Image (tube, rainbow, N blue to C red):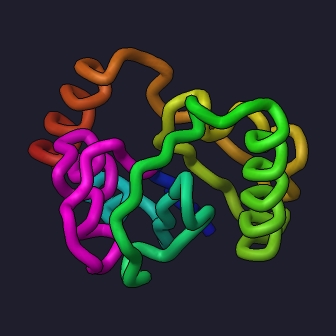
Amino acid sequence: MKIGIVSCSKRKLNKICKAEELYSASALFRYALSYCKKHYDRTYILSTKYGLIETSKVISPYELTVKNFNKVEKKLWYDEVISEINNSTTEFDTIYFHCGKEYYKGILDKLKAKYKIVLICSIGKRLQFYKEALKNG
């Protein structure tokens, strides 16, 4: 099974709603989510506040980013995310990360599933890739 993971975004709607709606203020998030839903069997969102969540989970807006965590907070967050991913996947799954480095760098060596980092490039190039891929099917 192929699993896509999209990171949350700084830009959010200011209301309680489904996770996929909350982060929809960000064009990069919208395109990455659309791409993942089209190309993978399951799609999750990696949220700084809520960890690994399903796109339909109803959540509240927040102001938090992994980049601002201190070393201890990052380790705790990474450990929680590792546990959540490992409990949601098997060694036969492949996880495709559509996230910035801060969101995956502390978890890769502890995953039981195979993984691939997608698009290690600038935000502009990532947007361009998603737009073209979605337009071309």
**Was residue 48 drawn as part of the magenta stretch in this picture?**
no
Q: Position of residue 100 (x, y in %)?
A: 50, 32
Left or right of residue 8, residue 81 in this image: right
Q: Position of residue 23 (x, y in %)?
A: 28, 57
Q: As displayed, is residue 56 above or below residue 91?
A: below
Q: Of 18 and 43, which appears nearest the observer?
A: 18
Left or right of residue 63, residue 94 in this image: right
The residue located at (60%, 31%) in the rendering is: 102
Q: As displayed, is residue 120 above or below residue 111?
A: above
The residue located at (19%, 26%) in the rendering is: 128
Left or right of residue 39, residue 132 in this image: left
- Give residue 117's quadrant in the image: top right
Q: Position of residue 118 (x, y in %)?
A: 50, 34
Q: Quadrant of the N terminus?
A: bottom right
**Was residue 31 drawn as part of the magenta stretch in this picture?**
yes
Q: Of 15 and 102, which appears nearest the observer?
A: 15
Q: In the rendered structure, which segment of residues is drawn in magenta? A: 8-33
Q: Position of residue 15 (x, y in %)?
A: 22, 73
Left or right of residue 72, residue 19 in this image: left
